[in-house]
Amino acid sequence: MINREDMLELTRRMTPKRTSITRIAGCYVDKDGEFDGSFNTNFLKLSEAEKAKNLKLAKVVPFSDTNKNLKKYEFAPKHLKPGSIWQLLMAIKECGLKNDALMDTFYDIVMEHYQSNCEYAILVFHDQYDIPAKASDKERLGESAEMFEYLICVICPLAGRYEPGEPECGFLFPAFTDRCGDLNHVDVFQRDPQKPHGELTEKILGVSLV
């Protein structure tokens, strides 16, 4: 189960003034499922308006209804191996989205399996959260407990030319569990849990519900 407070701790920082997101990368896919361009940029160099617009998209994942729209999934041990999507996500996280070849590989995997009847965007955010330590009474202490480095991915139908609309699905990797990075799990968002994009969990990520 996902602790709502863990997610709120992340979303409280998702404002243009407080964000520590370092980079955003993404690609656009046309209505035929073909690649239609990509970008990769330093998040802090965006205008305040662009920061706000993109943070609103990223925030959808951790701010969604926990254990309903946002659920925890597990990578099977056999998927924690070389050549796996898990290894690819780890490499993307560790390079901070700066390796375009890795990003292109990820986009290709998504485009191969994602089911959509319209144009869409795949957006990936990289963040480094310096987790503040807390005392036993949950009061915040000054020093940091550890660094949580993570990715947020959202898949959005386009509302206009190269203008992402409300995310249909996405994920936070690694999962944020008990205020720590949880490398064996991923928190997956589905905008409509009654009609989920099962291909995200089954074919793209290859994970099972906890």
Image (cartoon, rainbow, N blue to C red):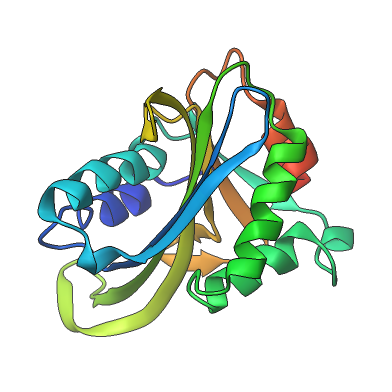
Instruction: From the viewer's side, name the closer residue of 197 and 47.
Output: 47
Q: Residue 202 lies in what quarter of the image? A: top right
**Residue 10 position within the rendered picture, expressed as x and y whole percent measured from the top left:** 30, 56
Which residue appears at 67% of the width and 35% of the height? 34
Which residue of the protein is positioned furthest toward the bottom in this rendering? 143
State whether residue 30 is above or below residue 83: above
Which residue appears at 15% of the width and 56% of the height? 47
- Report the quarter where the N terminus lies: top right
**Residue 100 position within the rendered picture, expressed as x and y whole percent measured from the top left:** 58, 68
**Residue 20 position within the rendered picture, expressed as x and y whole percent measured from the top left:** 26, 68
Instruction: From the viewer's side, name the closer residue of 119 and 44.
Output: 119
Which residue appears at 43% of the width and 26% of the height? 158
- Report the quarter where the C terminus lies: top right
Instruction: From the viewer's side, name the closer residue of 153 and 145.
Output: 153
Q: Can residue 183 be seen in this snapshot?
A: no
Which residue appears at 82% of the width and 55% of the height? 76
Instruction: From the viewer's side, name the closer residue of 119 and 116.
Output: 119
Q: Count up the numbered dots.
A: 0
Q: Can residue 145 be seen in this snapshot?
A: yes
From the viewer's perspective, is 47 left or right of 129? left
**Residue 159 position within the rendered picture, expressed as x and y whole percent measured from the top left:** 37, 22
State whether residue 70 is above or below residue 131: above
State whether residue 142 is above or below residue 192: below
